[in-house]
Image (cartoon, rainbow, N blue to C red):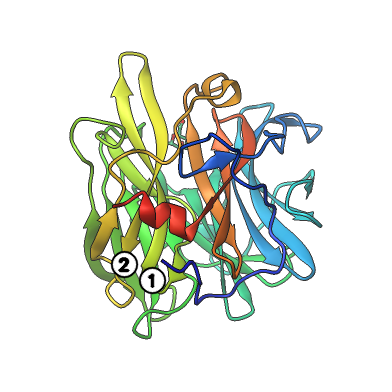
Amino acid sequence: MSGKNKSEALATIPWEDKPKNYNGPVWRYSKNPIIKRDQLKNSNSIFNSAAVPYKDGFAGVFRCDNKARQMRIHAGFSKDGIRWDIDEKPIKFICDYDEIGSFVYAYDPRVTKIGDIYYVTWCNGYHGPTIGVGYTKDFKKFYQLENAFLPYNRNGVMFPKKINGYFAMLSRPSDTGHTAFGDIFYSESPDLTYWGKHRHVMGTINDGWQSTKIGAGPVPIETEHGWLLIYHGVLTSCNGYVYSMGAALLDLDQPWKVLKRTKNFILAPWEYYECVGDVPNVVFPCAALHDEKGRIAIYYGAADTVTALAFTTVDELIKSME
Ligand code: BMA
């Protein structure tokens, strides 16, 4: 099976080869975590964050909860995708509409490049959580558009190109609390204001790591086999929610059609920094860089406290769905 990608690929992504005798499809960076909780003067935790290629390095939008435990998103830059320089101040969106632009909270950002614009989607406080949409060209000035959906919704992830002429987004309708349910849906928009033609993509699977709820993770990667989606799946244990990662292949032209999906998790909270923190037992992927060799670097939040990196390939993920 070829790991060749059709979408924009990068020259140099962070990378380590799979350790010998390791038998999972996704392996962790040996120096995890890459971003510690107190990297900013006033941060309590830096996790669930998005990185993209930018100029001759990388840029990103980071979830930084502050020491008042307020959820904020901050811009950052990096030469190597591993060591990040994150702005001490949260992003202040420029918005034409006061009703939408008055800030409540922002968390779990994703960044999608379409043309020369970087679109940011995040969980935006507007009478409860919903999907905020904004854009930037330079990671300095950020503009906010209308919220994509009515509350309550989380995990809004845009596709990196228009599909059948429309902007396309995955999301996960939810409730105001810690939502004990959740399937992934697909919606499209001609103009980033009006979203519709909602389609069900996939739901939970009884009895296992994805039995409570699932949500899209990084921006889907276009491959010759279909859209490769890395997602999170949650089970409810006697000790609370456990967040693991899975992968699925979606049809290229009708991405609400699931071609394949992993039965086993591809990564689960096994390491200390994934099991101990503000919310124990969480691996939460929000971004993935890929190159022309089919290599993938996944950025994920660990235990809602720090940011970590893991690696895989297109071939490994497709093999893990068989
Ligand atoms: C979800 C979101 C994520 C978080 C996860 C685990 O509902 O709040 O930001 O990582 O719960 O606490």
Q: How many marks?
A: 2
271 to the left or right of 176: right
303 to the left or right of 202: right
Q: Are marks 1 and 2 in contact (CB under 8 Å)?
A: yes
Instruction: Assign a secondary structure to mark 2.
Output: strand
Q: Residue at x 38, y 85 (%)?
A: 165
Q: Which mark is residue 295?
A: none
Q: Residue 210, image x and y in percent?
A: 29, 37
Q: Residue at x 58, y 75 (%)?
A: 8
Q: Is residue 80 above or below residue 224?
A: above
**What residue is shown with label 1?**
168
In the displayed image of the protein, which residue is found farthest to the front?
21
Tell me if I can see residue 131 in this picture.
Answer: no
**What residue is shown with label 2?**
187
Q: Residue 133, image x and y in percent?
A: 50, 62
The N terminus lies in quadrant:
bottom left
User: Dot 2: few (<14), some (14–19), or many (≥20) neighbours within 10 Å?
Assistant: many
Q: Residue at x 80, y 68 (%)?
A: 56
Ligand 1 closer than 8 Å to label 2 CB:
no
